[in-house]
Structures are given as structure tokens and as C-alpha cells.
Image: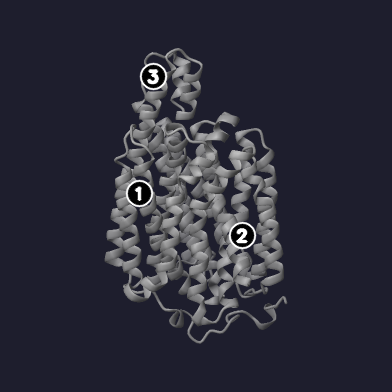
Amino acid sequence: MALVAVALSVLVISFDMTILNVALPTMAAQLHATTGQQQWIVDAYTVVFAAAMLPAGLLGDRFGRRRTLTTGLALFGLASMVGMVTTSPGTLIAARAAMGLAGALVMPMSLAVIPGLFPAAEQRRATSVLAASLAAGAPLGPLIGGFLLQHFWWGSVFAINVPLTAIGIAACVLLLPETRNPAAPRIDLLGTLLAAAGLSALTYGIIEGADRGWSDPLVLGTLAGSVLALAALVRRSHRQSDPMLDLALLADPSYRWSAIAATLISVVLFGAFFVLPLYFQSVLGTDALGSGLRLMPMMLGLMVAARLTERLVVRLGTRAVVATGLALLAAALLFGSRTGPADGYGRAAVWLGVLGFGMGLSLITAQASALATLPPARAGVGSGLLQTLRQVGGAIGVAAFGSLLAGAYRGALDTGALPAEAARQAGKSVVAADAVAARSEGGAALSASAHAAYVHGMALVLLVAGIVAVLSAVLIAARMPAGGPPAQEAGAGIEPGAGVEPAAVEDRR
């Protein structure tokens, strides 16, 4: 039952990472958000999430993992209440940033409690269950979001979080034991600031680069500043005996390559998730619920993969399963990149099913393998590092692919017959172009051009994502250890609560 409580917490956070993808077109129209603002509505969450993950892992190790987990769920619920009543893009971006901070408290702790709950022989299976819950949130988010938008106002995608977080808090308080590691290092304030500044600057520079140009002084200065901040963080971590960013964990090849694989998968998937909802709604003309339902093949593929991963790892080894999953991701994305303006949903249904299956094989296996290597005393820091790397990959994926989409869309859009202001508005997004077309003469031609331009941009994003997936599959096949450490090796001789002072474990019955 304790695992159910943790899995529920993970699911609430994970599906919120993608629920906005299907709600974004509606929000953009209601709040008059530009493409850049839409990217920040997504990226504000992921950037803060990634920046706060490392200190959050330390907080849990030092002050109590259940306490940190429930605090994060409470903050997530409060931030969701703000998001559901906002009327401006700026406020929504701020609410999403607060939700990212809350998610950073929840995610590493949900994984860090496993060594204190399960004997060594069961830890790998438990981490697989949580990894599956985390991966399931990706396709589940758009489905839930679509249903809510079909029947309620757009703020309902945040309102749903309030009762779910309340249930999660109650389940954690009643079912989870409290564990901590008082020997954990103190929070590194300077390191936290360096991580936040570096990640924020990196994402901002990538987003603005598409609009301002890559030679713009602000873009170059921001990107250079991000490199300096992140380099300073790494240098500081190397000089500390017990750092917040514990790069020594990467010395284990199983952990290192599993973390690299999970990061690369996140880059690829976040790019694909960014382009699909607008394709369904603006080009194919579906409503929000229809968009969510059209992602069901991905969910089905993920469910099938989740049932097979453990047996496949035992038979083939971690490397083979992760590399195969990445190869399937590549095949799906490359097939999707051949989509044309006249294609219907049939092509998308095929490659989405393959995408879900490949995502399940690669992401679930990579995360379970990385977590199985962590000693209980470093569970919070290690899971925090893993999720930080994943979210950095996700933020870069959204920013880079979003900028690529925006540039390709504007380059292919025909606005020659429009006044200058109308052309500028239509160039912001396909949603804006449809709005301009609705009030302009010759609107049908503009809509057709906008839809074709969006499909062109989407195809380019999927092509690049597919190439990244191919290169990732080759890299993992060549460098990752052949088999992940079995549970007996990962936790040999370790009993529940090991690495934690006896007085720091409190069972709640």
C-alpha cells in the first residue's frame, strides 16, 4: 500500500508535465499568449523543476523524505489553485514556476523512499513500478486535459490537481514511514543559485534565439552566462567533500549511462509532445478531448512495454532493451516526419503506438537501472541528480524544438496579401493565424497556408528528433554496460532503512 501512495504522488506530478500540451492552444487563445509565452508556460515548470531538484534531494535526506514529499504536494495544490483562476500569461507562468518547485520536492523523494520500504530483492521491481507510473503520465496528461477541456473551462486542468494532491498527502501520511539521513550535507545556497541561473539562462537563450537571431548580443550573452554558471557549479562540486551535485555518482557506469539515456529520451519526447496537440486541434480540427483520445495509441504502447520490460531485461540485459527502445522511438519519429498537410489521423496512430512502446522500453528500463545502483544513504541526492538531468533534457527539448518549429512555420507561411500588422500576428502561431483568417477576406487561403506551414514545421521537428534518437540508440548500444545491476547486487546486504540512523526511521501504522 505504501508503494501505491508513492505511485499516486508521482502520477499527479508526471501527468501535469504534459497536461498543458493539449490545453495550450485553448490557453493561448483565451490569454492571448504568444509562441514565446507558450514556451515559457511549459518551460517555467521544467526549468525550476530541474534547478530545485538537487537541493530538494538534500532536504529530504536531511529533514525527512516523507515530510518533504507531503510539503511538495501541498505546495503543488496551492500553486494549482492560483493557476486555475489566473487571467494573464505572466501570472500563469509564475504559477507554473511554483508548481515546478513543488514537483522538485516530490519527484526525488518518491524514489528515495524505496530503500526504506522494500528489501533488496524487491527494490528493482518497486523502482520499475514507479518508473512506469512516471512514464504513464506523459500520454495520460493530454487525455485527462482533453476530457476536462471538453466539459469545463481551461482552468480545470489545474483544478484537478487540488483533490489529487489532497489524496496523495493523506496516503503518504498514513502509509509511508519517515526516513532521513542526518549525515547529509547542508543546502549549498550558492550552488543552488548557480544551477537556477544557468538553467534559466540556457532555456531563455534558446527560446529567444529563434526570434532575435543567434547573433543577437542578448542571446549570445545569455547563453555565455549559462555556460559560465553551470561550469562554476561543476567546479564547485568537485572542490567539495560532500557536494550537493554529487558527480561521483556518475563514476558508476550503470548509473551514468542509464542517466544519459533517460536524458536523451527526454530531449526527444518533449520535442514530440510539443508539436502534436496543435497538429490535432488546428490542422485536423479536433477538440481538446479528441486530441487526448488520439494519443491513446501511445498510452497502449506504453502499457504493453511496461508489462514486458522486466522480463526483457532479465533475458536481454539493460543495454539491449534501452537501445531497442530508442531505435523504436527513432523509427516512429522518422515515419511521423513524412506527414503531409493532406494526411489524416491514420499515419499518426501508427507511429504514436510505436512511440509509446519505444518510450516504455527505454525510459522505464533506464530509470529503474539508474535507481537500482543508489545506496540508501544517497537515495535523495542520487534520484535528484537523475531527475535533474531528465528535466534539463526536457527543457532543452521544448526550447530547441519549439524555436525550430516557430522558425520553420514563419518561413513557410504566406502572408504576402496581408497588412503588416495582420501578417505579424499570423506569424506568431497557427492559432493566431486562424484567428486572423476568421476576420479577414480570403481567410480560407490564409488558414490553408498556416496549416501547411505548421505541418512543415512539425515534420522538421520530428525529423530532427528522429535523428537525435538514432544517434542516441547507437551511443547507448556502444557504451552502456550490457546488463543493469540486479537487485541483489544493487542492495546486497542492505536491509530497509540501512544507511539511515535508527532514530531517524519512524513507522506510521
Identified at 52% across, 48% down, the residue is 18
Q: Secondary structure at mark 1?
A: helix
Indicate the amino acid at tag 1: Trp
Q: Amino acid at mark 2?
A: Leu
Which mark, residue 105?
2
Foreground label between 2 and 1: 1
Q: CA distance from mark 1 to mark 3?
A: 30 Å
* Up/down of 13 relative to 334, above or below: below
Res 351 label? 1
Q: Position of residue 24 (x, y in %)?
A: 53, 38
Q: Earlier in the sequence, mark 1 or mark 3?
A: 1
Identify which amino acid the numbered label 3 is placed on.
Answer: Ala
Residue drawn at point x = 41 percent, y = 66 percent: 365
Disc 2 to disc 3, C-alpha distance: 49 Å
Q: Which mark is residue 445?
A: 3
The percent position of residue 372, horizontal first and vertical second, equals 47, 74
Mark 2 or mark 3, which is nearer to you?
3
| Quarter of image, res 184 | bottom right
Residue drawn at x 30%, y 59% is: 473
Pointer 2 local density, CA inside 10 Å: few below 14, some 14–19, many at least 20: many
Question: Which numbered disc, 2 or 1, marks the residue that appears first in the sequence?
Answer: 2
The disc label shown at residue 265, or none: none
- Between 335 and 235, the residue placed more toward the observer is 335
Instruction: Label 2, secondary structure: give it.
Output: helix
- Figure quadrant of residue 377: bottom right
Q: Please report contact status of discs 2 and 1: CB closer than 8 Å, yes or no.
A: no
Q: Position of residue 221 (x, y in %)?
A: 44, 39
- Measured in 3D between alpha carbons, the distance from the residue under mark 2 to the one under mark 1, in whole angstroms, is 34 Å
**Structural crowding at the residue carrying mark 3, measured as other residues with C-alpha within 10 Å and reported as few (<14), some (14–19) or many (≥20):** few
Res 326 visible: yes
